[in-house]
Amino acid sequence: MDVNNKSCYFSLSVLENDWFKEINDGWPGYSINIQVEEILFNGKSDYQDILVFKSKRFGNVLVLNGIIQCIEWDEFAYQEMITHLPMALHPNPQKVLVIGGGDGGVVRELLKYDCVRKVILCEIDQVVLDLCKKHLPSMSSCLDDPRVTINIGDGVEFIKKHPEEFDVIITDSPDPEADAEALFNKSYYTDLKGALKQDGIACSQGLTPYTDLPFIKNLVAQCKDIFPKVGYATGNTPLYAMGTLGYLLFSRIPDIDFTKPLRKFSNSDLERMKLKYYNSDIHAASFVLPNCFRNELQDF
Ligand code: SAM
């Protein structure tokens, strides 16, 4: 990782009695505990340690390398924000690329748009896809839609080979560790800009500012050398990431205002699209940051 002042996360998470405890050095002295009803898979792929379990109260949970990726109970908050923030800022998004995202949640949200003709999902790990198809169908069932093409491979390589091809690119990555580390590098963002059309918008998982502020600040500073406009929004994720996750927005248009969605959703749109978190007021408000982050992360 070339932007950090700490090395990538090192997870010490454990399964103890009937509890999963997420422990990692990204937030020392703190642990997320979720009670387990049944272990559905606990093993290794060629790329990572994978745990899928049924929790007592919050549905099924996907954990990669000891770090929670999504929980059925609150996944909508993350999937809706990372998808609809960039989609609402594009006048007519037809071709969309998702890097990572093997659980299918972002693809599910993208397919709610009639204007979307093609979604390419570039996920490095076939085993994640297979497990999510089996155990997280509310997210993954959309992956069989005819508008979706799945590419198994490294997003870092994929993005280099598709110049000026996409209206929207969403990087739905884990935190910066293992193969996801490269998705937080300056070179990745240079290639990402190259893969966007001139009026394209990109959005990436932006970590949690409560624990990762220096990292995010460095990443943003590097991305400002690449994109004329970079933005940072936050949203709630009640059960993980300290309850707050960030979203990085990128555009090649210098005078774009990320706080003003071009596409405003009426109440009937919200109902039709079954949106439980995102709406146009949340869109604007998500760029208003608490004082402890505002000076560091606003007005890029
Ligand atoms: N919502 C999640 C979060 O907040 O951390 C991320 C979800 S999604 C499961 C992340 C996916 O990115 C994983 O399935 C992982 O295998 C995939 N991934 C990691 N590195 C990748 C890379 N270099 N290229 C493509 N996919 C990658």
Image (tube, grey):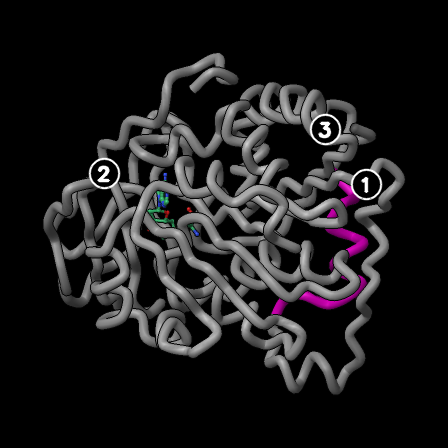
Query: Can you identify the residue that label 1 sits on?
Result: 253
Q: Callout 1: helix, strand or loop? A: loop
Q: Amino acid at mark 2?
A: Ser
Q: Quadrant of residue 127?
A: bottom left
Query: Is residue 78 placed above or below 2 in the rendered structure?
Result: below
Whichever of labels 2 and 3 marks the residue nearer the N terminus, that label is 2
Query: Is residue 259 placed above or below 225 in the rendered structure?
Result: below
User: Residue drawn 53% across and 68% down?
Assistant: 118
Figure label count: 3
Query: Can you identify the residue that label 3 sits on?
Result: 297
- Cα distance between the residues tagged 2 and 3: 30 Å
Q: Amino acid at mark 1?
A: Ile
Left or right, 178 with respect to 16, comes to right
Residue 12 or residue 162, whichever sits in front = 162
Comparing labels 2 and 1, the label whose residue is closer to the camera: 1
User: Residue drawn 56% across and 45% down?
Assistant: 245
Crowding around mark 2 (Cα neighbors within 10 Å: few <14, some 14 to 19, many 20+) is some
Q: Position of residue 115 (x, y in %)?
A: 67, 74
- Cα distance between the residues tagged 3 and 1: 19 Å
Residue 134 or residue 296, whichever sits in front = 134
Q: Quadrant of residue 47?
A: top left
Q: Callout 2: helix, strand or loop? A: loop
Query: Can you identify the residue that label 2 sits on?
Result: 13
Q: Position of residue 154 (x, y in %)?
A: 34, 41
Q: Which residues are magenta?
A: 277-289
Q: Position of residue 95 (x, y in %)?
A: 59, 62
Query: For residue 33: magenta?
Result: no
